Amino acid sequence: VLSDSQIIVDHSEARERRRSMLEGSGRMGTFLKRSGGLVFGVLLTVMIGVAPYASGQASGPRRARSVQEKPEENQAELDAEALEEFREEVEEYIELRKKLESKLPPLPRQAAPAKVHSYEIELEKLIARARARSQEGDIFVSEIRPLIRRLCRSVLTTAEGKALLAEIREEAEERISVPARINTRYPDEIPISTVPYDLLKVLPPLPDVLEYRFLGRHLILLDIDARIIVDVIRNVIPH
C-alpha cells in the first residue's frame, strides 16, 4: 500500500515526465490514434467549425485556398493539442483517485446515507492531501482554457443562449458565498449548480466521477462523489 507521501511524489513526477515527453512531439497524429481520439476528433470538428470544406470550398485545387484559412488550420492544431493534454491530465487525476480510493473500506451498495456521507468526507480528505501542491490550471491546462471560454461563449451569446445565461446567473446568486477554490469541499448545504445540456454537449467529455459546474462566473471541475473542487477556470461566463 502506497503512503500518502509516495502518492503525492508519484503524482507530481508523473506529470513532469509526461509534459516533458509531450514537448516537441507530434501530438496531432497520436491524438487521433488513441482510444478516445475518435470522440475528441468528432468533438473538435464541431467545435472549431471545419465547415468551409464541407460546404464545397474544398472542391477546388489546393493552391486556391485563401490566406485566411491558415489561421484556422493553426487553431485546429492548437485545439487538438489542448484537448489531448486536457484528456491526459483528467486520466492522471482518475488514476490518482483510484489509488486513494483503494485505501478506503469498500462502500456497501445499500449503504445508509450517513455512511455514504462519511465515505465522501474521507475520500475528499485523501484527495485534498494528495493534491496539496496542486494549483489552478493543473488539469484545466493553459491551452484548454481559451478553447473552453470560446465554446461557452459561442453557446451563451446566441439568441437562444441568452435564456440559458439568465438561468446560470440566477443560480450564481444563490451560491455567491461559495468560493471557487481548488481542493476545497463544495458545501453540503448548498445545491450543486446545473449546466445546460446545450453547453455540456460542446464541452470536452468527462469520466463519470467528474462534472462541469458553475460558481458565479467561474467554471469548476467537480469530483461529484468527494464533492471536491478539482480545478477552476475563472470568468467563463460573459458579463
Image (cartoon, rainbow, N blue to C red):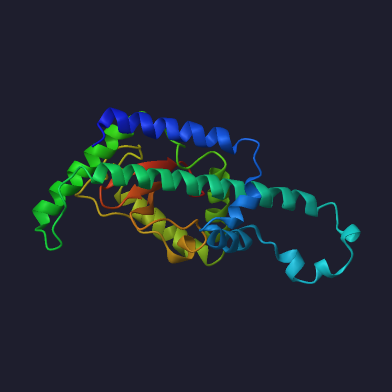
Check the image and report above or below for 72 versus 60: above
Residue 25 visible in this rendered orientation of the protein: yes
Residue drawn at point x = 53 percent, y = 35 percent: 19
Residue drawn at point x = 27 percent, y = 32 percent: 129
Residue 218 visible in this rendered orientation of the protein: no
Extreme residue in the front direction: 1
Expressed as whole percent of the image width and height from the top left, the position of residue 183 reads 31, 37
Q: Relative to 25, is 208 on the left or the right?
A: left
Expressed as whole percent of the image width and height from the top left, the position of residue 32 reads 60, 57
Q: Tell which of 45 and 97 is nearer to you.
A: 97
What is the tally of numbered marks visible in this picture? 0
Q: Relative to 76, is 33 on the left or the right?
A: left
Expressed as whole percent of the image width and height from the top left, the position of residue 224 reads 29, 52
Check the image and report above or below for 51 versus 190: below
Q: Relative to 58, is 88 on the left or the right?
A: left
Image quarter of residue 218: top left
Q: Relative to 123, is 231 on the left or the right?
A: right
Quarter of the image for the N terminus: give it. top left
Expressed as whole percent of the image width and height from the top left, the position of residue 160 reads 52, 67
